[in-house]
Amino acid sequence: MALDQEKPASPNPEGSFAGIGRRFENILLKNLDLLLQRYFARADYPFIDMKLSLIDGVDFDALPDAKKTLKGSGAIYSWIQGRGLEALSGHAEWLEECRILSESDKRFRLSQIKTVLLEVSAEVERLRRINGGHLFFCTDSQGVPLGPNSLWKDFAKRAENTSTMSDLFCCKGLFAAYTYLQDSAGASRAAGWFKAILADIDLGRFINDQFFWGKENASPTGQSHASRMIALGGLSLFAKLSGDRFYLDTAAGFIQHIIEKHVNTGRFSALQEFDFIEFLAGDGTPQRNQGRVLSDPGHCLEFVGLATKALRLIESGAYAEHDNLLKLCRKQLPGILVHNFNNGFNRRSGGICKTFDLISRQPVDSNMPWWSLPETIRAASEVLAFVPEDPRKGQILQILKDCADAYLDRYINPSVGCMAYQTRDAQGKVADIPPATPDADPCYHTGLSIIDFLRATARR
């Protein structure tokens, strides 16, 4: 069907969201259709295929050197497969609520989603079995780890006895897929795996297995919040789909840990209140690199959204033992959101910088990935629902407007399924720099964040 091309108004600071929901729904459907069309165009490729340039739409396999690079179909990114499974499951649920599709259009897409979930889940399980119960950031179709150099292969080998970020993303995706497919045995396996990953996070047996484009190091050093932050999304997902309060109790502990360890609430006199510290040294102080203390504003804003989503589930369960955490977060999360958005947002070009130095108060990596904008839209809408009378409400509404305007007006590429350019530089020019993978987002950051926003808007 032809989707609506109309461009309604953006939300205004007073909280009117008239029209913006319809525009976002159109974008989500176009993104979803692009993913599904690419999957069914290749009967011989049982993986989610988002291997195309979001700048010009060129398929990576059409590049002359595709077979020699980490871009082509021979490179399977576990993060893309796991995120895609979770996103497709979430979109299947959302399609039932979608206001701009006929029932026949919904059923057609739901049938396609079911096929993708069945086939891709089987492939992810196969790769996991090959690697002794773990997954790695990038492998070939036989599960052999791939990377930019020989050092990466050694790093991947050292990861065999510890949980990885790829494990976490794929475990979440498999649980969502199996639950949607009503495969109780598969969902039970994924739940057991998730609990093992959570235990590894607590015991420090967890690594970010990502390699970084243009950098020799396999992973930054220092104690990161990332494992607990990404796990928060899974904890809400597992709690919602299983009804097991273990997941919300764990989420409460993870939120407490991140706020106590990574948010400056007065412990570090060299930093400002609510600064979010990306890496800690072994003694728990902010890690310094050439005098800098790095913050990733997008990661902080993503944390705010995922934490608030979990807290609202805890609140709805009326778990009295978490009342103090709820009070703390109602007081602090709005401030954390506003402060770190202001640290990272480039008002001239409309985007959020990748890294920010908390000492010089200047961007370190001024490039602006797309994903932090929808994550901040989710964070703002969740905080508004969690603390509706916060005195910073007007500022939070303005943040939502700024991010929606930047995303809709400066990042969308209408010629490539209305997907967002992956990165723009500080001057606002499109930059060919992959934020994590060269593969495009499989409806995860944008889709799941905006679905949460649409639901929060519907409740207003």
Image (cartoon, rainbow, N blue to C red):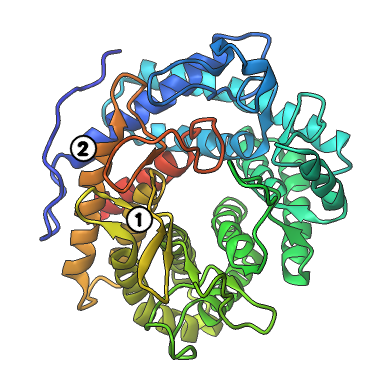
Residue type at mark 2: give it.
Asp
Looking at the figure, which quarter contains the C terminus? bottom left
Residue 282 sits above or below residue 11 on the image: below
The residue wearing badge 2 is 409
Q: Is residue 447 left or right of residue 140?
A: left
Q: Quadrant of residue 281?
A: bottom right
Number of callouts = 2
Task: Residue at 23% x, 59% y: name it.
Answer: 399
Residue type at mark 1: give it.
Thr
Residue 190 place in picture, x, y as percent: 73, 46
Q: Which mark is residue 253?
A: none
Q: Which of pointers 1 and 2 indicates the residue nearer the eye? A: 2
Residue 408 place in picture, x, y as percent: 24, 38
The residue wearing badge 1 is 376
Q: Is residue 183 left or right of residue 417?
A: right
Give the crowd class for mark 1: few <14, some 14-19, many >=20 residues within 10 Å.
many
Residue 109 place in picture, x, y as percent: 45, 20
Q: Nearer the viewer, residue 255 or 96?
A: 255
Residue 405 sits above or below residue 396 on the image: above
Looking at the figure, which quarter contains the N terminus? top left
Q: Quadrant of residue 123?
A: top right
Q: Nearer the viewer, residue 99 or 11?
A: 11
